[in-house]
Amino acid sequence: MGKFWVIFVASISILLPFLCNSFSPETPTDRRVLVLLDDFAVKSSHSSYFNSLKLRGFDLDFKLADDPKIALQRYGQYLYDALILFCPSVERFGGSVDVAAIINFVDSGHDLIIAADVNASDLIREVATECGVDFDEDPSAMVIDHTGYAVSETEGDHTLIASDDFIKSDVIIGSKKIEAPVLFQGIGHSLNPVNSLVLKVLSASPSAYSANPLSKLSTPPLLTGSAISLVSVVQARNNARILITGSLSMFSNRFFRSGVQKSGSSTKYEKSGNEQFLTELSKWIFHERGHLKAVNVKHHKVGETDEPALYRINDELEYSVEIYEWSGTSWEPYVTDDVQVQFYMMSPYVLKTLSNDKKGLYSASFKVPDVYGVFQFKVEYQKLGYTSLSLSKQIPVRPYRHNEYERFIPTAYPYYGAAFSTMAGFFIFSFVHLYNK
């Protein structure tokens, strides 16, 4: 018994730091990140990007991708909140990690970053395909752009691209404008048209194409123009987030610090936009921005405060909910004008836009429809870049009881008058008839 207790305490002491700092609804920012590398040299050649994560409080665990001891979970508990795959050439993951384990990791609500390059293995390509994108099937292909390349001292093969075609979303890439183009050198990918959750964050120019830069084109390239995505993101239905790119180099210190001038432009920037772009994008991927929560969902009759067990047709009611956005350190009021509530039974009988007080409280008043049954208050909020909200609360609605109807209905006054006149005439006729007898 004593030995068992020692083992139990030792296990708890090992797992406690993980369990205490893990991703939770109250502090949704990822904290424990597993980084899988092809070579530990990447740890120093990409140190600027890793240091930016550490400065924001992330705990990075670096391991070789083929390490036989790596694992994503232990005793049914995930050891990490996010996974970074900077191992484009790995042929087989070590330990218990494989494609299925990575997809299950994402399906459990965890986040993922995939960076490939021209040496991308079939394994990395398969992971990307499972996430909704397809890298160019030609293993020697790279993105080439003869008009949108980065100017350099040597003419080169125009595979070093300077791109500034960003997604128009402040929540995904930040509200501060990225002035300098982003340097990209690697392989392009296309989005799976069946997957509506994948978004292009950085696109190639209309003049770009994907081909082998060392050989002449014998057939038209399969990937061309703006259909080529350089960086894509996915927000799954469970709000897990994924970043996919075909350029590991774009995270490197060299690309972060390099000056850039786009062909055809006279403006030369002392520093590329890579650091700002990838830092801001990582804030979104790791839920430091765009993560919403809804609390204190309430409804009651107008003039009352207690939530009733049911409503009666034509009752006046009030519905309210508080919505907050995670800023990376605290919950701040989320302010917008496009949140709607439905009063729903098979279809929405009431659809009302909620007003807000600029402090996170959203509310609306409306009359219960003249239909009885089992209704639901529903809020289905989906907005580009934000985690989705799905709120539902069931409530029955009853008809009037027999003694709750109005004694006299105003709209029926003409009928009452006609009936009264008829009865009065009958009584007068009867009285006169009896009097004459």
Image (spheres, rainbow, N blue to C red):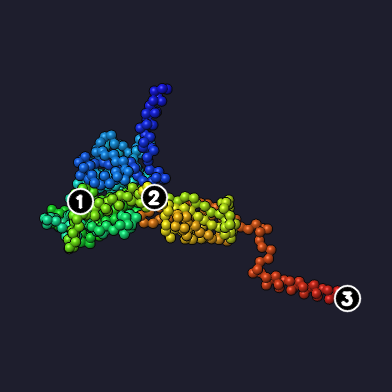
Q: Percent position (x, y) of residue 285?
A: 32, 49
Q: Nearer the viewer, residue 413 or 319?
A: 319
- Which tag is nearer the camera, tag 3 or tag 2? 2
At 33% across and 51% down in the image, what residue appears? 284
Q: Which residue is mark 2?
A: 326
Residue 156 lies left or right of residue 290; in this view the side is left
**Amino acid at circle 3:** Lys
Residue most extreme to the right: 437
Q: Nearer the viewer, residue 34 or 74?
A: 34
Residue 63 lies left or right of residue 338; in this view the side is left
Q: Percent position (x, y) of residue 45?
A: 20, 44
At 39% across and 50% down in the image, what residue appears? 326
Q: Is residue 91 above or below residue 7?
A: below
Locate the C terminus and report the quarter of the image it occupies.
Answer: bottom right
**Amino acid at circle 1:** Arg
Indicate which disc, 1 or 3, sits on the residue closer to the N terminus. Answer: 1
Q: Is residue 224 above or below residue 60?
A: below
Q: Nearer the viewer, residue 433 or 102?
A: 102
Q: Residues under labels 3 and 2: Cα distance?
A: 94 Å
Q: Residues under labels 2 and 1: Cα distance?
A: 30 Å
Label 2 sits on a secondary structure element that is strand
Q: Residues within 10 Å of mark 3 (few under 14, many from 20)?
A: few
Label 3 sits on a secondary structure element that is loop
At 19% across and 46% down in the image, what residue appears? 119
Mark on residue 437? 3
Q: Percent position (x, y) of residue 84?
A: 28, 44
Q: Percent position (x, y) of residue 180?
A: 23, 57
Q: Which residue is mark 1?
A: 257
CB of mark 1 within 8 Å of CB of mark 3? Answer: no
**Residue 83 is at least partly visible in this image:** no
